[in-house]
Structures are given as structure tokens and as C-alpha cells.
Amino acid sequence: MRNNEQRVLFLGFEALLSPIRLFATSCRVLVFSIVNIRLHGREITNQMFESAVLSLPIILFSLTIVSLMSILEFSWHMKLVLKQDALVPGFSMVLMVREVAPVVTAMLLTSRVGASIAAELGFMKVTEQLDQLKLLSVSEVEYLVIPRWVGCVFASITLTLASLVTSICVSTGIASRFMNYQPHEFFNTLFVFTKAFDLGGGLLKAFCFGTIIPFVSCVCGLSCQGGSRGVGQAATRAVVQSCLFIIFADFFLSYWLWTF
Amino acid sequence: MNMLEVKNLSKVLGERQVLENMSLSVQQGEILFVLGRSGVGKSVLLKTIVGLIHQDKGEVWIDGEKTHPERELAMVAVRRQCGLVFQSPALFDSMTVKENLIFGDEDKARHISATMAWLKLPEKILNFYPSELSFGFQKKVSLLRTLLSNPKYLLFDEPTTGLDPVTTNLVNDVIRDCAKARNMGCLVVSHDLQSAYHLADRIVLIDQGKIALSGTPSNFKESDYPLAVAFRKGTINFAEGY
Ligand SMILES: Nc1ncnc2c1ncn2[C@@H]1O[C@H](COP(=O)(O)OP(=O)(O)OP(=O)(O)O)[C@@H](O)[C@H]1O
Ligand SMILES: [Mg+2]
């Protein structure tokens, strides 16, 4: 019993420490490869395209629905308490910039990109492609991890911005169609509570989440064992662990940026 | 001394002692066949030599220099001298055949045509993805990739398993050429007894993690060691613990 508890504790620590260790190694390798001009440019652009451009439709669609819901929901609450909903645009924008846009984008990226990273690297591991990489003296951090990191950070930041723009358009549209706002009137009240610092905080979150996803997923893929079952488990672990990491990181960042 | 030497190599994987005090050597220009039943640890032996698996005990020496598998940077030179052709083709599936071949060193492109002709591979496959090739072609491409880096020692992990008789003969010819015409040292892990009789200068038989028999093909043919007898007959006497 005691042994089992220790094992679970050890595995938990391992899950936490491995991505951090890989992150440290990658920072070192990144500096080294920039100094030696040994970045795999084509691989990096591929990853940027795969992570950002291919995720764009699903993220814009989801964010449209989420911002629509948040406007309607806010309006209902305000009318209930204050008997009017004039502050809806301002409040919903703050929520969008600080929380919804970075977090929902990151969650969707995790399920699309994180799972695919873990499955791809896991498959490479079980088919000895990673061993072959070592035989060719190509660093797996340099060739596999860093391009995915750059791709994910790029995707996370640009998609967060894109989802903000979408949500502004959608909420203006909804408000003028269903809530008797004039579009310009709604638009003008959108930014009453939002400051540049909020946008900076939201983008900092996007950067952190865009870093968490590839490192957690790469660790899951690179440590994958067994055959197809191992690959499946690696993908599942990547999504679950990335989501948990993102939720924790979101809490700490929000506390540090806006409450502290 | 121009040779690849393995000295007292031991490795435990999981609960099992896969390699136990294993010693062998291959000289340049020599073909050594390593035989053994499935799961005895032949692939583990080859991966240990190039440092993909770290041994628990023992040493690997190349041309009189000891290798240090724990130092990744030092292994770069070792892996340049020792080419390993994996049991599975292990081609990068996101790249075309050509990209696979030149990956890591663009200079290799210059020798592609000649080497492809040697392996009787049509040039049109260069633009194919590995998944568009049959298993046999994938294995040949994987062999081609290793040959292109022109190593001093070649380690083959079951190079002819799963190939038709014509391709098997072709691969055997390539192995012979590598050793005799190009003076490479070849360590071939195989189950194919006919190829071994045909090509090997020496045969080593591994049994339960240890070297059970080492000698020329004619030594192997005459040996009355139970596993050698079983290999020749193709049947196993289970009463003797096999
Ligand atoms: N990474 C690993 N972790 C744990 N055990 C392993 C690992 N790799 C190999 N083994 C075990 O080591 C033993 C030897 O495996 P190996 O692949 O070397 O066999 P082999 O002699 O090459 O067999 P075959 O002829 O079927 O290819 C097997 O029992 C295998 O289960
Ligand atoms: Mg094997």
C-alpha cells in the first residue's frame, strides 16, 4: 500500500518535472542553435502552418459561440439585478481579453495540436525513427521539440488575437441585432474597462499556454512505450496533462496579474 | 588495430538478463554472422554497440578506442564510423525517399545515383513517400541510407528477413561487396542459415544471453551443440530447455 502511494507520488512528480526538464534543455539547445545558425527553418514553418492556420476554423467557430453565449448570459444577469444591461459590452470584453480568449484557444489547441504531437512522436519512437535520428546525429530537441514550440507559441498568440477580433465582431453583431444597441454605441462601450495591461496579460497567458502544450506533449510522445496502445495512451496523457497544467497556470497567472 | 570489439557486455532489461558477459570482434573486411533464437537479444546487442541502449557492464572498442555511450557528443563520431541498418525500415514517414536519404548531410546527394544502381533501385522512387513503397523497398532504402554515409563498420539487423529470394541474394551480394571490395567490417544478425554459410567468415551463436559457439561456418555445420543442431534441422528439442 505504502509502496503504491510512493509510486503514484513519484509518477506525479515525474509528470511535473519531465516537461520542465525538457523545457530547460530546449532553451539551452535553442540558444546553441541560434548561435550556430542551425535552426530547421522548413520544419518550423511547417509547424507554424499546422498549428496556427489549420486550427483557425475550429477556434474561430468555437470562440464565436462562446462570445455569443457570454453576451447573452451577461445581459440576463445584469437585467435581473440592475434592470438594465448597459455595462454588458465592457464586462464581457474584460472577460474575453483576460480569460476566455487565451484559455479557450489553448484548450482547443491542446486537443488538436497537443494530441497530434504526442501521437506523432510516440509513433516515431515505437517505429525506431527516433533511434534513427540519433544515429544520424540529429538532436531530437533541435529537430522535433523546438519547431513545435515555436509553432505552438505562434499559434497560441495569433489565434488568441484572432479570437478577440472575432468576438468583438460577433458581440457587436449580436448586440445590435437582439439587444437594441446601435453598433457604434456598443463598440464604444466595449473598451471602458479594458486596459492595455489586460491585453498584455492575455497575451502573456497565450505565450505560457503555447509553451506548456508542446513540452507536455513532447514528453508524453518521447516517453511512449509499447505499440499502438502506447501511442494512444501518450496522446490521451498529453491532452489531460496539458489541460491540467493550463488550468493551474491560468489560475496562478490571473492571481499574479490582476489580484495580487 | 582496425576492429570493432565488444568486451564483456552485460545488460538487464526489465527483469531479464538479456546480454551476459558477451565478447566478440569484427575486423575490417570481415563478415561475422550472429545467430540466435528470436528474443535472445541480438537487436539489443547491435543497439548497445552504437550507444542507443546503454550497457550495465562491459565496453565497446572501435579501432582501439573505447566508446562512451553516456556522452552523446562523443557518440557522434562513433555513429559515423558504425552504420546500423535497423530490423524495421525506420524511415521518416513525413519525408520523401530522397529527403530521407540526404537528411542530416546534404553532401550525400552526390552518391545517391551510384548507390541506387548498386542496390538496383529505380530512381523514380526518390519522390515517393515511404508509405507508398512495399516493405522490401523500404528495407532497401533503409540499407541505402546507411550505405550513403560510408561507414567503416556496418551492423545489419536481419537484413534479408521478409524479402523475396532474388532481393535476398542481392542484399547478400551487397554485404559481400561491402566487406570484400570496400573493406568494411560487417556484423550481420540473421536467422538465415543459408546466407550465413554462404557469406560468413565466422559465425557466432548466442544462447540465453551468452555466446554459445563461435567459429567458421564449417565449425558450425559440424557442431553438436543442441541449439546449433536445432538451427540446422529447423526443429527444437523442447526437452532440452529450448
Ligand atoms: N526497451 C526495452 N525494454 C525492455 N525490454 C526490452 C527492450 N528492448 C528489448 N527488450 C527485451 O529484450 C529481449 C531481446 O530483444 P531483442 O529485440 O534484442 O531480440 P532479438 O534477438 O533481436 O529477436 P528477434 O530475432 O525477434 O528480432 C526481449 O525479451 C525483449 O522483450
Ligand atoms: Mg531483433
Image: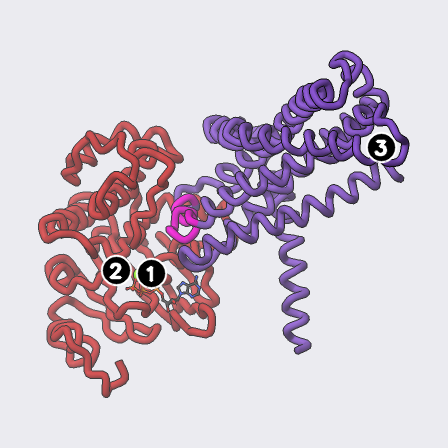
Q: Judge whether residue A38 can be spotted in this image.
A: no
Tag 3 residue: A78
Residue at the limit of the structure toward the bottom, as seen here: B239
Where residue A182 appears, as percent x and y from the top left, is: 76, 14
Does A195 sit left or right of A157 as displayed? right
Horizontal arrangement in the rendering, residue B83 relative to residue B15 (left or right): left
Q: Is residue A214 above or below residue B34?
A: above
In the picture, the quarter occupied by the N terminus of chain A is bottom right
Q: Residue shown at 32%/54% (left/top)?
A: B1
Q: Quadrant of the rendered structure where residue A185 is?
A: top right
**Eyeballing the image, is B6 above or below B148?**
below
**Chain painted red:** B
Whole-angstrom CA distance, mark 3 to mark 1, is 69 Å
Q: Amino acid at mark 2?
A: Val
Same chain for labels 1 and 2? Say yes or no: yes
In the image, B136: left or right of A183? left
Q: Which chain is purple?
A: A
Nearer-N-terminus badge (1/2): 1
- Cα distance between the residues tagged 1 and 2: 8 Å
Q: Quickly name the residue at label 2.
A: B189
Name the residue tied to disc 1: B43
First to last magenta residue range? A123-133
